[in-house]
Image (spheres, rainbow, N blue to C red):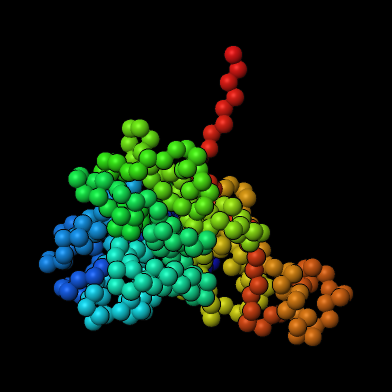
Amino acid sequence: MGLPSINIEFKSVGISAIERGERGIVAIILDDSTALGLHELVSLEDIPAGLKEDNIDYLKKAMIGYVRPPKMIKAYIANLSSGANTLAEVLGALELVNFDYLVMPEADDFTRTDTDDLFLQIKTWRDNMGKKVKAVLANKAADYEGIINFTTEDIQVGGKTYTAKQYTPRIAGLLAGTPLQISATFAPLPEVDNVPSYTKSELDSKIDAGEFVIFHDGEKVKVGRAINSLITTNQDKPADWQKCKIVDILDLWYTDIVRTAEDNYIGKYANSYDNKLLLVMAITGYNEQLELDNILAKDQNSVFVDVEVQRAYLLSKGTDVAGMTEQEIKEAETDDKVFLGAVLKPLDAIEDITMRVFI
């Protein structure tokens, strides 16, 4: 007979997580007067004809990726410089578009608040709407896990020099092309000839300040450490949240659980204790698949009925919980509410090596 269908759905979503994580989607906002609207690009042949030379270059840079190219580039082309379109209109159109990383290589060229507006929109999407996307912005010390603060200027590529914001499409594509099992830390950018020189102390200071930088190690240009702009950590957002890899995993987990529950669970089952356990088992199966794929740490993840929150809910309804056992609280009716908790341990990548040498 096999598992109930909801378990199968969560398991299959988990199996495909590795593919989605390895091949993310980059959304890029471009200013042009032709080919207006949203375009989905998977190869150079998909680049719309007639675009400005700089815009073609931005798209090509985004397609490079890292271990592999991004799954797709979603280019939203608007006539921003003429005022015919506004950034607010573009962001409104992107609200229902699926992507992982957002960039705008000409941010602040049209209004001085473009970068700030992008940051606020990302924060609104992530915190209020459950749209777990990130943005690569230039020189934006946002102190926020959803913003990658790219700060390297004067990037020399084949006789052309790029500013940090002009090179954000390349960085977004690199992150989108990084598999979830590894980090983009020390990822090489073979097309870059040179960048400004930094001492180790300067690089350490920049990274500690939440800056995503690239540097020349004497042989090649590569990423310093794949971090976002978060520097203020706390119990809810510990130091792990500063790493792009960890946030990517948590974002994938959140999005998969929400979408699969909405499609296969909500409204389709009676709210009994048995059916709550069905959902717990289904999410546990999803986690186990991510453990097999080296995305979550093995045997360190759990899903459970949240007794503490459920007890508080019962109290709010006037239920006398003083004499109830923990199991009775778990099995109590909670109307249309399901209160679950989870412990997750995303698997980090090897980045710091300490070796003791004995002679």
Towards the viewer: 171 or 195: 195
Residue 21, given in percent of the width and then of the height, sits at 41, 55
Towards the viewer: 324 or 269: 324
Asked if residue 1 lies left or right of residue 305, the reply is: left
Task: Tell me what residue is drawn at x 50 percent, y 43 percent.
Answer: 204
Q: Residue furthest bottom?
A: 318
From this view, report whether residue 350 is shown above or below residue 110.
Answer: above
From this view, report whether residue 95 is shown above or below residue 205.
Answer: below
Task: Tell me what residue is drawn at x 58 percent, y 47 percent.
Answer: 298
Q: How many marks?
A: 0
Give the quadrant of the C terminus: top right
From this view, report whether residue 288 is shown above or below residue 48.
Answer: above
Towards the viewer: 208 or 30: 208
Asked if residue 254 lies left or right of residue 224, the reply is: right
Residue 159, given in percent of the width and then of the height, sits at 19, 45
Task: Tell me what residue is drawn at x 33 percent, y 74 percent.
Answer: 111
Q: Residue furthest top?
A: 359
Tell me where residue 45 sits by quadrant.
bottom left
Task: Tell me what residue is drawn at x 47 percent, y 37 percent.
Answer: 200
Tell me where residue 326 sits by quadrant.
bottom right
Residue 339, given in percent of the width and then of the height, sits at 65, 72
